[in-house]
Image (cartoon, rainbow, N blue to C red):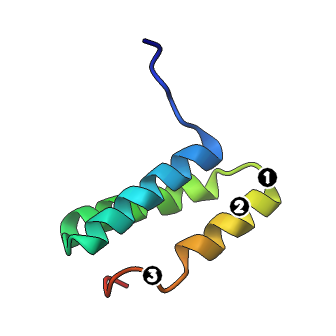
Amino acid sequence: MEEIKPEDWDLAYCYEAMARVQALLANKELYNKYYTLAEEAGKKIAGAEDKQQFKADLNDTNWFGMK
């Protein structure tokens, strides 16, 4: 089976999803790790509209009290 290597938008949202899961589980250490990775990956999104949408999603209020 071919390995999938997400890049750009996909990678940023993978990290964002992991951060949300860790927030739901109240795991502050892993939440911080994945949130930081999501922020870094989000800065590298090539498309301006995609980057803007990602920032909006990352800055919403659904973080289960972690933000």
- How many dots with numbers? 3
Image quadrant in which the N terminus is located: top left
Image quadrant in which the C terminus is located: bottom left
Answer left or right for 44 relative to 20.
right
Q: Position of residue 41 (x, y in %)?
A: 54, 52
Q: Which residue is at 80% across, 59% downward?
A: 48
What element does badge 3 sit on?
A: loop
Write down the residue under mark 2. 51
Answer left or right for 25 relative to 21.
left
Q: Are marks 1 and 2 in contact (CB under 8 Å)?
A: yes
Write down the residue under mark 3. 62
Q: First in sequence: mark 3 or mark 1? A: 1
Q: CA distance from mark 2 to mark 3?
A: 19 Å
Q: Where 58 falls versus 30 (above or below)?
A: below
Question: Which mark is in front, 2 or 3?
Answer: 3
Q: CA distance from mark 3 to mark 1?
A: 24 Å
Could you tell me the amino acid type at mark 2?
Lys
Q: CA distance from mark 1 to mark 2?
A: 6 Å
What element does badge 2 sit on?
A: helix
Q: Which residue is at 51% across, 63% downward?
A: 39
Q: Which residue is at 21% across, 73% downward?
A: 28
Tell me the crowding category of disc 1: few under 14, some 14 to 19, or many 20 or more residues within 10 angstroms, Cα based: few
